[in-house]
Image (cartoon, grey):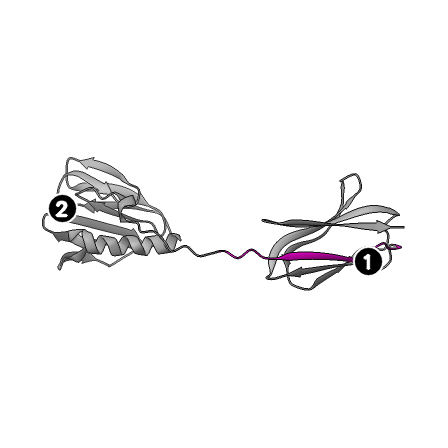
Amino acid sequence: MLLYNHYATLNRLKQEYAPFSTTDFTTSFTGAIKTLRLTKNGETAFIVGNFDVNSQLVSLTLPNSGRWYEFFRQDSVDISTTNLSITLGPGQYRMYTNTKIVQADTYTIAPIIPTVETTLSLNVYPNPSSGESVSVAITTSAPIRGEVSLYNISGAKVMSLYHGLIADGEIMQLPSSLQSGIYFIQVKTQSQQITKKLVVY
């Protein structure tokens, strides 16, 4: 979604804001700090980026003094001269314009992609059991991250059987040291939780 909106923003800027369809531009692409100035019909966009792996104190010379608007942070700065000093972290960039562009106005609605919930089922066998060779089998329509745990009848966790990516057909063995009693085996994911009762005699 974020990447989609980012490209949608850039496309809208090119279509609706004069500097982004100009042939009047100047560049400075040498070194770690790179700048691009776009001008058309009295509107100017000044873009600067830090391509270094370290933070950099950047001294900019803007085309004129006055108020400049930073597009991505949606704030502004008033300068009495054409000089502006800013600190950019590694990979950071800024875009200053002499006319205010409200970022929300440039976004388009991303297509709605339907989500398909992963189906999950749990089988414990043999059940009831003497406690020997009890298997926990999980069926899932797609690999999903989750935890498989064993609880006693009081609701206290006896042990965590597995934690991680659960694949279809996953089979786990319970320890043969279980005492007689009633237990509950629970599979819990971010969106689902299923429980099966196990009787050990």
Answer with the quarter of the image where residue 143 lies.
bottom right
Amino acid identity at mark 2:
Pro
Name the residue located 36 percent from the left edge and 56 percent from the top edge.
4
Mark 1 lies on residue: 134
Tag 2 or tag 1, which sits nearer the N-term? 2
Name the residue located 81 percent from the left edge and 51 percent from the top edge.
198
Answer with the quarter of the image where residue 10 lies.
bottom left
Name the residue located 40 percent from the left edge and 53 percent from the top edge.
1
Element assignment for label 2: loop
Main SS of the magenta part reads loop
Question: What crowding class fits label 2: few (fewer than 14 Cα within 10 Å), some (14-19), or many (20 or more)?
Answer: some
Question: What crowding class fits label 1: few (fewer than 14 Cα within 10 Å), some (14-19), or many (20 or more)?
Answer: many
Element assignment for label 1: loop
Left or right: residue 170 compared with residue 5 = right
Residue segment shown in magenta = 115-130
Left or right: residue 56 compared with residue 120 = left
Residue 63, disc: 2
* Magenta stretch: includes residue 123: yes
Residue 152, placed above or below residue 167 = above
Disc 1 to disc 2: CB gap under 8 Å: no
Name the residue located 10 percent from the left edge and 47 percent from the top edge.
42
Labels 1, 2: front one: 1
Amino acid identity at mark 1:
Val
Residue 23, disc: none
Q: At which x and y percent is residue 25?
A: 15, 57
Left or right: residue 19 compared with residue 49 = left
Q: Is residue 49 visible?
A: yes
Q: At which x and y percent is residue 132?
A: 87, 58
* Foreground pick, 125 / 17: 125
